[in-house]
Amino acid sequence: MSWWPSRRVRRLPPPPPPDEMLVTEDRLRRNVEDVLVVRDRQVRGAAVVFRGELTTEPARALDLLIARFRPFGYTPYLREDAGVVAVQALPMTETAARPATRPNVILFSMTCVTMLLAGLGYVGAPMFDALRTAPSLALRFFAGIPFAATLLAVLVVHEFGHYFAARYHGASVSLPYFVPAPPPILGYLLFGLPIGVPFGTLGAIILMRSPARDRNSLFDVAAAGPLAGLAVAFPAIVVGLTWSSVVPIPPEGYSGFGDSLLTWGLAYLRFGHIPPGHMLFTHPIVDAAWAGLLVTALNLIPVGQLDGGRIVYALFGRRHRTVGRATVFALLVLGVGAFLWSLRTGGDIVLAIGSSLNWFVWAGLISWLVGLHHSPPLDDVSPLSWGRRAIGIACLILLVLMLPPFLLQIKSS
């Protein structure tokens, strides 16, 4: 997941004295007039807005204005405004110096450890399961490799998909920051309860330190991560299913991950209809790929700073807020539906609440933490290419296919 600083909370420096601001506005106007036929102009604190019609293509106009505004300490933003083009000159923000990579390395190392610990909770790989009874504790630790290596591959490829797409478009970007999380086995050892994050990680982010140039580059950076991660997760789950099997449900019942349309379809192609009283005993690679698909799906939710939010902004521009509100509403509906369905299929009230709670949590996190706002690119006038539009619609379809209505399913024999 990539993360741009939000323009909504950006604080502009205090405006200079009026006389100095008039001089700055006049200098900026002189550098705009051969690019934009200025119909009106407006000074808003330290920002200056010129409105009119461009005399050249938006991409070329942006190149010229960036070079001309830089000596005055300003950055141009192009956007459509009531049938004309507005050139908004904002004071430049200083580009942060390249930080040390030590935090990235430390967090990545910690994530490797927590994911290996989480991997101990997933069995089904005979060669690695044999390590669980090894005399050496170090060897037992490596029993979690099938799960940890698969999920880590999905996350690493996802984040570096963002990274290399951003570098290709000349954006300033950080290396990935992986987020370790205590796995259930650690909670059991410390508190006697299997509490924790079942994947051993909360994912990873990269920080975008500069705005996207236009909608095409915004789209490329946003879509590169999920599509790259999917290129690892999809073959992983296909291979893992070939090493999985159908077995009778044990007398005590079982719990497992809920199916999305994609995972259900792949399992059906491999095993057909699973007879009553039987269950799919998955290889740890399948469990890790399921987690990778879930992470990809959650990132594709079309809201705010999420990858899906950027894709929707590139597709629909300012209407992305409407899509975001509809998405939050859809998550609430999904939560209510999961609750009612769980009750209808014989689940008790506790299970029904557990099945639906995650969607209400996501709706709340999106509304209060992620938000519906998205930072505009420098050039918000040039349209998105038709090829990218088709890929963007495909990404939204993938969201529907990969998002499971239930994160957990519990069945008895």
Image (cartoon, grey):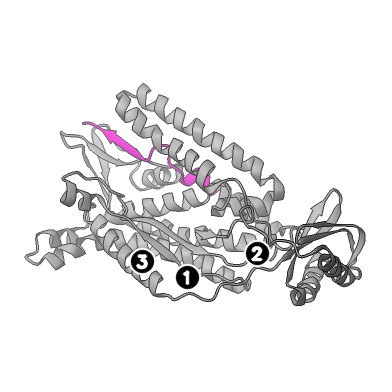
Q: What residue type is labelled 2?
A: Ala
* Circle 1 SS class: loop
Q: What is the C-alpha distance between the residues marked 1 and 3? A: 11 Å
* Circle 2 SS class: loop
Residue nearer the viewer, 51 or 361: 51
Residue occupied by mark 1: 175
User: How far across and how far down the image is residue 123, in percent?
Assistant: 21, 53
Residue occupied by mark 2: 212
Label annotation for residue 107: 3
Q: What is the C-alpha distance between the residues marked 1 and 2? A: 17 Å
Disc 1 to disc 3: CB gap under 8 Å: no
Disc 1 to disc 2: CB gap under 8 Å: no
Q: Which amino acid does label 3 sit on?
A: Leu
User: How far across and how far down the image is residue 350, in percent?
Assistant: 30, 28
Q: Can residue 375 be seen in this view?
A: yes
Left or right relative to 306: residue 29 = right
Q: Residue at x 68, y 51 (%)?
A: 315
Q: Is residue 123 visible?
A: no
Q: Which amino acid does label 1 sit on?
A: Leu
For marks 3 and 2, the one nearer the N-term is: 3
The magenta span reads: 398-413
User: How far across and how far down the image is residue 171, in percent?
Assistant: 61, 70
User: How far across and how far down the image is residue 412, in percent?
Assistant: 23, 31
Residue nearer the viewer, 288 or 18: 18
* Circle 3 SS class: helix
Q: Residue at x 32, y 55 (%)?
A: 181
